[in-house]
Image (cartoon, rainbow, N blue to C red):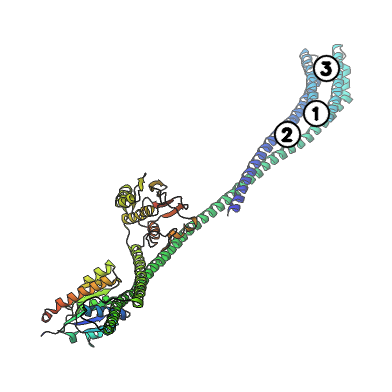
Amino acid sequence: MTPVSRRRTALQILLLSAGFLVLIAVSVASVLLVNKARDDNAWVVHTVEVESQIANLLVEVRRAESATRAYLLTSAPQYLTEYQTATAGIPVALDHLSNLTTDNPAQVANSAKLRTAIEQRLAEFALGIDRVKNNDAATSVAILRNNTSTDALEAIAKIGRDMRAEEDRLFALRTATADRTQVFASSVTIAGSCMVLALAGFSIVLLRRSSQARDEAEARLLDNNLNLEATVDERTADLREANEEIQRFAYIVSHDLRSPLVNIMGFTSELEELRGDIFKRIATLNRSASMALAMPDDATDTAEPELEGSDKQLSDDFTESLAFIKSSIAKMDRLITAILNLTREGRREFKPERVDVRELIESIVKTVAHQAAESSATIQLGALPNMVSDRLALEQIFSNLIDNALKYLKDGVPGAVTIGGRTKLGFAIYEVKDNGRGIDAKDHQRIFDLFRRAGTQDKPGQGIGLAHVRALVRRLGGTMSVASELHNGSTFTITLPVNWTGKNRDRDS
Amino acid sequence: MSDPVTIIMIEDDEGHARLIERNIRRSGVNNEIVPFTNGTEAIKYLFGTDGTGADRKGQALLILLDLNLPDTSGIDILKRVKENKYLKATPVVVLTTTDDSQEIKRCYELGCNVYITKPVNYESFANAIRQLGLFFSVIQVPPAAI
């Protein structure tokens, strides 16, 4: 689950960065290509300009030629002026052309040749003009009439054609380049956009998939939660059932154990009575025998017959045996009664109610005041948070613990019992602390077991109190623990929910 | 002369039965005791073969009933006796080891006359039986009234 999602996140980031990179590349390429296209276009414009300049130049040359001829024919000064303007513009146009064609070595050569040809031509014009001025127009006219074109004219025409051709070629080339650049630019833009779109699409697919996975996981989690709840309920029901069964079992067992015990006790008592009768009879027989032997006088029969010697020993043995049987039965009866009471306690319905714990403990302390005074023990109460719980159960818990604290004091040390409490995270924690004889660490578990006790057995008890307390604490939804060292006092800690709602009780009992 | 009261003792534990009998005798009650060790036979005796109880009509009876019987529940017998028109006036003494207040309450609700917990302590047991003896003598005085 986790590595998959991590991989997915990494891929997502990768995609995003790839998208950005593509965008940047496309932008840079676009800028470069746009610049290139601009350059290309500039070159195309340049070509056109060169062509128009050539045309311009040739027109100027023509104009100069026609002005020259007109002047030749008419000798009108206006044509002379025109000739002068035209010839004045030609070198400027020629310079301009040369400047424009510096980039192309072929055109540079051509323009140089053109310059020479035009200069030659201009010289021819100037010669013509001079002839007119010297009134020798006839020669020029003759030359014209013979139509003997000069080298310069041909050269101009040829070079002009060449240059045009060259510029045409360049125009075609440059237009093609410009077109290619534009096509390339648009292709790059389109390709980039497509890539970005593809990445975005992929990203969306991934996002969709991951959200789907999340939804599935959520559904699974919900499912698991439900299952867990069901399982917990099931287990709880099982446990409750088992607990009830154990309680029923304990109840039945203690009942059934009691029945034969009634017989044992009853017939033991019968035996006791029989013993009285038997020994009385033995005593009587003995006495009558001894009386018969001693020829009795008027000894009174009212005197209680008494046993002597071995008979007395026999009677004492009999009594001792019966006493042991009876004390054992009494003990067994107490144990069975205790189990019965425990099971009955387990079947009692607990009622949550608001309990003033201080008041409750103070009333317990009052009832044990005599016991405390006897063993010169003091009981101190600290902070005691109130809570909602079963009052009777709390009473039993605290009175058992306080009773134990007072019961198992250290000899020769005045007892000091402190009871305190605090609340933490919805639980009330109470501590009953004494400076008594303490409990060995190996007995910490044992003291909570039914009928088990620890340490010097010099106090009466059945080993039920703490088992009972722990059972009650559990039923109230809490836990209890002990911290103690031998000879160094004990601290019993009880943790109970502050607001017990009765959730942990056995509903069916 | 009136009919002497017959004591019907329904008790599965023979030891208990014997102890009860001895103590009854010891406290000076000499009425006939008819013992049963299971519920089925006791029911057959009490209600007759037809189950109506007509056989026992007019007889002066006292029932000592143990609640823990192997075949039927003593509570059921108590219920049937108290529901039967011929037997409902018969005093029933419930004798059991249970001292559960719920069960005691239930027995009294069903019409049990006395509920005695079988104690292990012999002294108190004898005391209970003696009280039972007193009880017998009380009901023996006006036997015709039944």
Where residue A89 sits in the image (x, y, percent)?
77, 18
For residue B93, which quarter of the picture? bottom left
Which kind of residue does numbered mark 2 sit on? Asp
Where residue A123 sits in the image (x, y, percent)?
86, 18
Which kind of residue does numbered mark 1 sit on? Asp
Q: Earlier in the sequence, mark 1 or mark 3?
A: 3
Q: Is residue A361 above or below residue A142?
A: below
Residue lying at 46% horizontally and 62% vertically, measured from the top left = A231
Of circles 1 and 3, the one toward us is 1
Where residue A410 sits in the image (x, y, percent)?
41, 51
Same subunit under labels 2 and 3?
yes
Q: Chain of mark 1?
A: A
SS class, disc 1: helix
Which image quadrant: the N terminus of chain A? bottom right
What is the spatial separation of the Cα atoms under label 1 and label 3, in whole angstroms?
40 Å
User: Number of marks in the image?
Assistant: 3
What is the spatial separation of the Cα atoms under label 2 and label 3, in whole angstroms?
47 Å
On residue A103, the disc is 1
Q: Is residue A254 above or below residue A207?
A: below
For residue A78, which quarter of the picture? top right
Residue lying at 74% horizontally and 29% vertically, measured from the top left = A46
Residue lying at 86% horizontally and 24% vertically, measured from the top left = A117
State the residue lying farthest toward the top.
Answer: A134
Which image quadrant: the C terminus of chain A? bottom left
On residue A389, the disc is none
